Image (cartoon, helix red, strand yellow):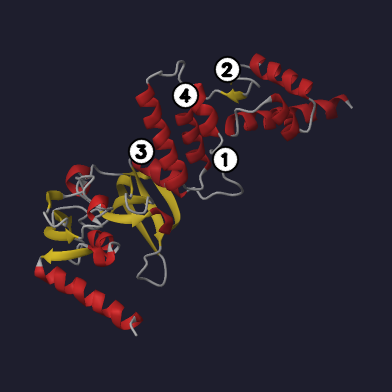
Amino acid sequence: MTVTRKRDQGQRLLRHIRLLSEEGPLTNAELARHLNCQPQEVQRDRRLLRAEGHVIWQTEERPLRYGLAHPWRAATVSPDPVRAVVTHALLRLLRHHATTPSRVYHEALLHLTEQLPPRLQAVTRLTLTPPQGNTPRMLETVAAAWCYGEALEFLYQKPTEREPRWGVADVAFMEINRSNLDWYVFAQRRGEPKVKTFHLSRFQDARRLTAQPSPELAFDPRSELDGAWGIIGGQQHCEIALRFTPDAAPYVNYRRWPGQLEAQQQDDGCYDLRLNAPLDRHHLPVEVMAWIRGWGARVEIVSPDWLRQQWLAEARQVGERYGP
């Protein structure tokens, strides 16, 4: 009986640690409900955990909520409101717009949460639910290969190919695409001269080649990605002149766009915008064109003429397909 009781308590303590770490802060009542025990047992377990060296913190508001401090948790939280809201905005971006089913990713977000003042922590933690079930470890594997300078062997499914293909590459950079907010990997395949872009969600398998160190790669994110609308940057660009209708102008003229060279509000209410747009390997500004198409009839491509003709041809195709 005593052995069974100690085993049950040990298992409950492990669940208690997981709850405080991944889902805290939680009240005594919430912990008791999750652990299927009495609140008095939760308090006793908390004393045991503290006696074993676990740092358990609590919120200031009532009812008290408890969480587990990770080794990386800051001893003091910066009271700077701007720093706090920037950290909060980063958390929202990563959790709700660039999410990935990774437990390590979730722990990293918890780490960021612990840099917030208690008032912001309470509301932010409500949204940080841990991933369920088995989760892929693509992000962890690729990130480790980049951080530790190791070659990466991976199985990758190109959208233009029927079957995935194995390859070995060295990771140069990782980026969240500003357009679709997905994770991308910039890597150079062994035997190829250039760094290429890979969509992380298309990795089907990956493993680190710990015995094969990666060389230093000549990759400068400023020259490669500054001015990019998504993940396409580099040296090849073309200038595009656009004219927006008066009803679209208020939704365009409020900010500076990537690669913007010149902008001017016209007397008739139209808005002229000139951009330096990156080209893909087929010498097309595909990412900027996707943005232009989204404006429909409220934008006109003024120049260059070859791009204007392509845009007009697409518009005619749409009209022919859906016209009367």
Classify mark 3: residues with Cα within 10 Å, few (<14), some (14-19) or many (20+): few
What residue did someone put label 2 on? 60
Q: CA distance from mark 2 to mark 1?
A: 22 Å
Q: CA distance from mark 3 to mark 4?
A: 18 Å
Mark in front: 3 vs 1? 1
Horizontal side of 31 relative to 102 (left or right) equals right
What residue did someone put label 4 on? 72
Mark in front: 3 vs 4? 4
Q: Residue at x 54, y 39 (%)?
A: 127
Horizontal side of 313 relative to 131 (left or right) equals left
Q: CA distance from mark 4 to mark 1?
A: 20 Å
Q: CA distance from mark 4 to mark 2?
A: 21 Å
Please tell me which of labels 3 and 1 falls first in the chain: 1
What residue did someone put label 1 on? 129
Give percent across and percent down for residue 104.
50, 39
Classify mark 4: residues with Cα within 10 Å, few (<14), some (14-19) or many (20+): few
- Secondary element under disc 2, as helix, strand or loop, is loop
